[in-house]
Image: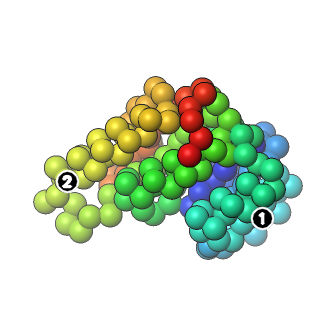
Amino acid sequence: TALDVGSSPGGWTSYLAQAGCAKVWSVDPGLLDPGVLALPAVEHLKMKIEDALPLLTRKGVAGTIGLYCCDMNAPPAQAVKLFLRAVPLLRPGAAVVLTFKNTLHNPRAKRAEWEADVAAGVEVMGEAVEGVRVVQLFANTPRECTVLGRVIRGIPQR
C-alpha cells in the first residue's frame, strides 16, 4: 500500500499501481489523468493531505502504508512537516520518497538559502527516517532534489 501526496496528474500514482502496489492512496485537490483513475488499485482523495489524514485514519489505514511518496509543489519545510504528520499511517520500515522543490524566486542568487533549506529538511526528517540521502533523479529539474529513506522502527507516533 502506498500514499502518494501531491499526486496530480498521476505520474507516481500510475507507476506505483502498475508496479504492483495493491492500493495507492492518491491525494491531491487537482485532477488525475482518466487513465490513472481507471487503474483498479488507485483511490483518489481529491483534497489536501491535511484533510486526508483524518479520513485515512478513520478508514483504518494507520500503520499499513509501506511507501510514502510526495511530489507536492511545496518548499522542503512544508513537505517535511506534512510528512511527519503522516508518519502514524506508515508502517515501520516504510520507504519514503520526498521531492524537495526550490520555490525561491531567483534561485541562482539564493543558492545558499536553497541548500540550507534542503539541509534543514533532511535534519528534521532524521527524527522519523533512517538512511536519509539526497539524490538528483533523472526526472528532477535543476530546482528539485529527491530525499530517500525508511521510517524508523518503533518511533513514537505523533
Picture residue at 69% right of the left edge, 61% below the top? 54
In this rendering, the answer to whether 5 lies above or below 28 is above
The residue wearing badge 2 is: 113
The residue wearing badge 1 is: 37
Comparing 43 with 34, the one in front is: 43
Given the image, on which type of amino acid does mark 1 rest?
Leu
| Percent x, y of residue 1 | 75, 43
Disc 2 to disc 1: CB gap under 8 Å: no
Q: CA distance from mark 2 to mark 1?
A: 38 Å
Comparing 124 with 115, the one in front is: 124
Given the image, on which type of amino acid does mark 2 rest?
Glu
Picture residue at 59% right of the left edge, 50% below the top? 86
Other-residue count near label 2 (Cα within 10 Å), few / some / many at <14 / 14–19 / ≥20: some
Picture residue at 65% right of the left edge, 59% below the top? 53
Q: Nearer the viewer, mark 2 or mark 1?
A: 2
Picture disc at residue 49: none
